[in-house]
Amino acid sequence: MAAAALLGGYLIHDGTTAQGGPPRPASADSTATPVPSSGDPAPLPFAAPSRISIPAIRVNAPVMRVGRDNDGGVGVPPPADKNLAAWYGGGPAPGQRGTAVMDGHVDNKAGPAVFYNLGALHRGDHVEVTRADGRTAVFTVYGIELFAKSAFPAKRVYDDTGRPELRVITCGGAFSRRTGYAGNVVVFARLTGTR
């Protein structure tokens, strides 16, 4: 998944006119190593995700499957649909053992999009992923960071930790109409429940 580091270049749009731009992660919420708990659920079998919900930032969006784009990076949803997230189908499904990857736009030409407020999340917030098997995988955020696209830590973001984990990614940081966003906001979360 090293080529997935190219993802950042494809979540760039020029539509944000909101004062101050999208929220940036608080330094207090930077990534900590999750401490596995004996109460953590076992990994789930494969089932594609159909919806992502992040109650703390009022996200409730359908999910489409994407693969690699023409440049070898992770694909993204069509920019015109501002309430659509994507799951990289070349990796684990959310809830399976391994690191599942989901992404979405921060904005588009019409304004804020599905993950505009991703940088406002905090440790302990939940991400819920509804799956095609009718189960919901509940993830707890253990870190959120803003990485410069020029120094995106692909290994740290995408590597398999041996546990069911989730990364949610969008653009962030400084914005230029010529080059787009300078960074990516990455949410690190681990499976802590199912229903």
Image (cartoon, rainbow, N blue to C red):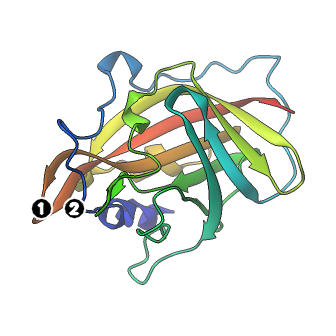
Please determine whether, in this image, residue 75 is positioned above or below residue 136. below
Give the quadrant of the C terminus.
top right
**Real-space CA distance between mark 1 and mark 2, rounded to the nearest whole angstrom:** 6 Å
Give coordinates of residue 32: x percent, y percent: 47, 22
Q: Quick check: 21 above or below 8?
A: above
Residue type at mark 2 is: Asp
Which residue is nearer to you in this view: 11 or 156? 11
Question: In the figure, is residue 138 to the left or right of 180?
Answer: right
Compared with 49, 39 (above or below) is above
Q: Which residue is mark 2?
A: 14
Say whether residue 93 is visible.
Answer: no
Q: Position of residue 22 (x, y in %)?
A: 29, 39
Residue at the image position 34 percent from the left and 28 percent from the top: 25
| Crowd class of label 2 (few under 14; some 14 to 19; many from 20; radius 10 Å) | some
Q: Are marks 1 and 2 in contact (CB under 8 Å)?
A: yes
The residue under the point 47% across, 56% down is 104
